[in-house]
Amino acid sequence: MKKSDLHIPFEFENRRPIILNRLLYVPSNYDKHQLFNEDIVFENDNNIAIEYCSGNGDWIIEKAKTNPNINFIAVEMKFERARKIWVKMHNQNLKNLFVVLAEAFTFTKFYLKDRDVFEVFINFPDPWPKKKHKKNRLIKKAFLKDVARVLKKDSFITIVTDHISYRDEIIDTFLKSLEYRAVFQKPYFVQNIQNFGSSFFDTLFKSKGKAINFLKFQRV
Ligand SMILES: C[S@@+](CC[C@H](N)C(=O)[O-])C[C@H]1O[C@@H](n2cnc3c(N)ncnc32)[C@H](O)[C@@H]1O
């Protein structure tokens, strides 16, 4: 598979969600999600884990390879990055991986069923460090509410970030939510999890000597 093998077969004005060879594309500025009636399907009914904000997919590709009994969904809203994951998925014949080219909140709200997901991971969500851009942060009350809807009871969500103020904001949002309980004791994060895996940004930040924070919450 090559980059050029992924074709979106319509113009922007005629945009619609579509599944193309194990990639679900949900166009931006689109509001007829209810018209889409296909499902993401795997070869078996194994548990589904989602990684939101997958970037170039280093972390989820490795997880899919080493955990063939889990079905993984990579969610990434940038076309070039989602396409990179899609190419690697096909070239490495990873049948337990599916790529979603979509904005994470929209995908969760309109394309996932209640209590269908076994685990969620978010590695280095964009922190939008400037005050005027903070509104763009993904991990907010409304998003976590929808993630809670799709998570199975007792399942986990893990978030990894180097960014201290985003870390504290995320913890605060979880603690205010009735749908989750903290896995780690106060201050509710740890700075290492054995065998967690590594992503592009994990490697980059570690090479700069930055501390990495792991936050983990359980759906109650
Ligand atoms: C800082 S990068 C981290 C990438 C990767 N997880 C890693 O650790 O190397 C954040 C990624 O999240 C994607 N992203 C940001 N907001 C998103 C959203 N609302 N929905 C889907 N993807 C998003 C960006 O396009 C970018 O690829």
Image (cartoon, rainbow, N blue to C red):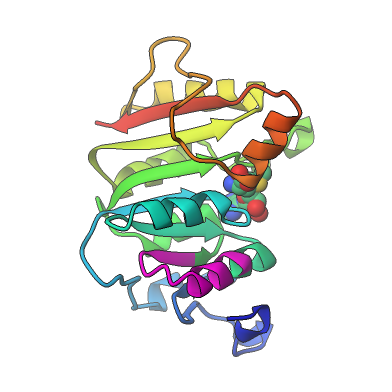
Left or right: 147 as drawn, with respect to 208: left
Q: Is residue 153 above or below residue 113?
A: above
Task: Answer yes or no: is residue 29 visible.
Answer: no
Q: Residue at x 33, y 41 (%)?
A: 148
Any part of residue 207 in sight: yes
Q: Nearer the viewer, residue 174 or 132?
A: 174
**95 or 9, which lies in front?**
95
Could you tell me residue 119's position as x and y percent? 34, 44
What is the quadrant of the N terminus in the image?
bottom right
Quadrant of the snapshot with the C terminus: top left
User: Which of 220 and 63 lies nearest the eye of the viewer?
Assistant: 63
The answer to whether residue 89 is magenta is yes
Residue 118 within the segment the image draws in magenta: no
Relative to residue 206, is residue 70 depicted above or below? Answer: below
Q: Which residue is painted at 39% across and 57% down in the image?
A: 72
Q: Is residue 145 above or below residue 169?
A: below
- Which residue is pictured at 70% across the width and 24% down the height? 210
User: Picture quarter containing residue 7?
Assistant: bottom right
Quarter-of-image position of residue 216: top left
Count how many numbered circles sit on residues in the image: 0
Q: Is residue 14 left or right of residue 33?
A: right
* Residue 105 screen position, x and y as percent: 50, 52
Q: Position of residue 103 (x, y in %)?
A: 56, 58
Q: Is residue 137 left or right of residue 71?
A: right
- Residue 178, placed above or below residue 139: above
Pick out the residue farthest to the top: 186
Q: Which residues are magenta?
A: 84-99
